[in-house]
Amino acid sequence: MNTHMRSALAAAPDDQIVFDLAGIERQYATLVRELPGIQVRFAMKACPVDEVLTALADRGAGFDAAGPNEIAQAIRTGVPIERIHYGNTIKSDRSIIDAYRLGVRDFATDSLEDVAAIAAHAPGARVFCRLATSGEGALWGLSRKFGCSGADAVRVLEAARVAGLTPAGLSVHVGSQQMTAEAWQEAIARIAQVVVTLDERGIFLDHVNLGGGLPAGGYLDKRGRPLDPPVDEMFAVIREGMRLLRKVSRTPLDFRMEPGRFLVADQGAIRAHVSRLTSRQQLNGERQYWLYLSCGKFNGLYEMDELQYRLVFPSHPAAAYVPAVVAGPTCDSDDAYAHEDNLVQVPEALASGDPVWILSSGAYATSYSTQGFNGFSPLPYSFINVVDGEHGEHGERHGELGELGESGERDDSNDREAPGLRGSVSGVCVSMAGRQ
Ligand SMILES: Cc1ncc(COP(=O)(O)O)c(C=O)c1O
């Protein structure tokens, strides 16, 4: 967490999710620097927040949209329509018609049925075929619902050509929060085989889409250990893969990616509060602490099934800790870290209303929130943008940031106070990493 985010969280009077727009822009800059020539199509599902989309669009990103509603939202950012593709292989006739009417001409596909529908309702469109991947190495595999074999991809793109569509590309998604570089190695090898086969059949692609899956750096695993994805290795493998694919293709290839999580996860944090810390005797006679937060699976932390978020308890700097199950506020037993035997160390003195900061929660937080399940509303959001030197909730300033030097580098130090806040918080500590 950088000092600007810390300041914003400390200044937030109520629950909200804070996005660091300049941080998102820095992530974008890192991506295009590490993968020269890559065209970014931000996966909107990860964070469909207008201000975030506009920040990315202004930097040159386009959008991976899953249907007409996302397409319409992407168009509102002002990006040229060529930078928006319909990246969902699942589409009804109605959706294709609406997307075509909105001007989209690039469609993902993975089946003959879908190609026939695109040909009927989006005549002359360009299609890219999604290859299946195993999803191995990822927290969320995305393996069976989408994508087809290489042999099927050849059939699908040949059918597209016959139907008057332009067979334009191939895509993959190696699984979300992918933790291994090998996943891209395997996917790229599979793409290369298909590119060669298509070349032989006179189908010359103009691009390859390497999908999403690039991981965030700030999560803990189910046991509370830092997830430490080898991002540099991934970039190296992808760069090498791009070189290889350019070599095997008879025609020039462009490269696209559809990152979601990588661009936004570590650039968002939630200011929540403690509902209650309780201790209850269980049926087995043991006493168990439960920490109920104001924010849980249904209003921002949907992904708590597969990971733990780092929690900060800013009003309890040097505390005695107790091991607790962390849970959300609803009357639903699913709304809890479902990590058996893995308890989180939390300050024993936590009181109702104490602020809690939930780090690396910028991806899939707003989009996976229910509309108010059990009466718990989705979180409002606010922004910081250190480039402009101000932060605000929907345009309002929260307070002065003070003199905040910004190196442009990621600052993971958790033991520093924001200069502008010195004295106004009783200390800052991170207190959620331990397994009992
Ligand atoms: C088609 C597609 N592209 C990109 C993404 C973004 O994935 P991630 O957030 O893992 O980068 C997703 C997410 O599941 C997706 O379904």
Image (cartoon, helix red, strand yellow):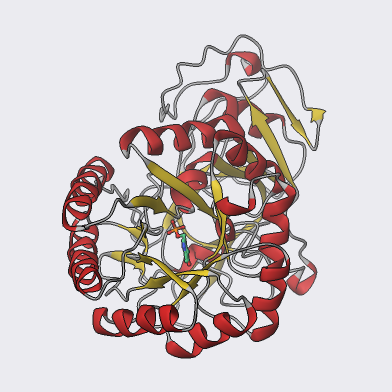
Q: Is residue 240 above or below residue 64?
A: above
Q: Residue furthest bottom?
A: 113
Camera-side residue: 25 or 192? Answer: 192
- Which residue does the image show at 55% across and 70% down from the upper left? 125
| Residue 392 screen position, x and y as percent | 75, 30
All told, the count of numbered labels is 0
- Which residue does the image show at 44% across and 25% down from the upper left? 415
Camera-side residue: 49 or 41? Answer: 41
- Which residue does the image show at 28% across and 49% down from the upper left? 229
In the shown orientation, is residue 203 left or right of residue 384? left
Q: Residue furthest right?
A: 396
Quick one: quadrant of the C terminus? bottom left
Camera-side residue: 180 or 436? Answer: 180
Q: Is residue 310 visible?
A: no
Q: Is residue 110 above or below residue 405?
A: below
In the shown orientation, is residue 207 left or right of residue 72? left
- Which residue does the image show at 61% across and 22% down from the upper left? 386
| Residue 325 screen position, x and y as percent | 49, 63
Query: Which quadrant holds residue 391?
Result: top right
Q: Is residue 131 visible?
A: yes
| Residue 350 screen position, x and y as percent | 60, 46
Q: Is residue 200 above or below residue 344?
A: below
Camera-side residue: 376 or 193? Answer: 193
| Residue 169 screen position, x and y as percent | 38, 64
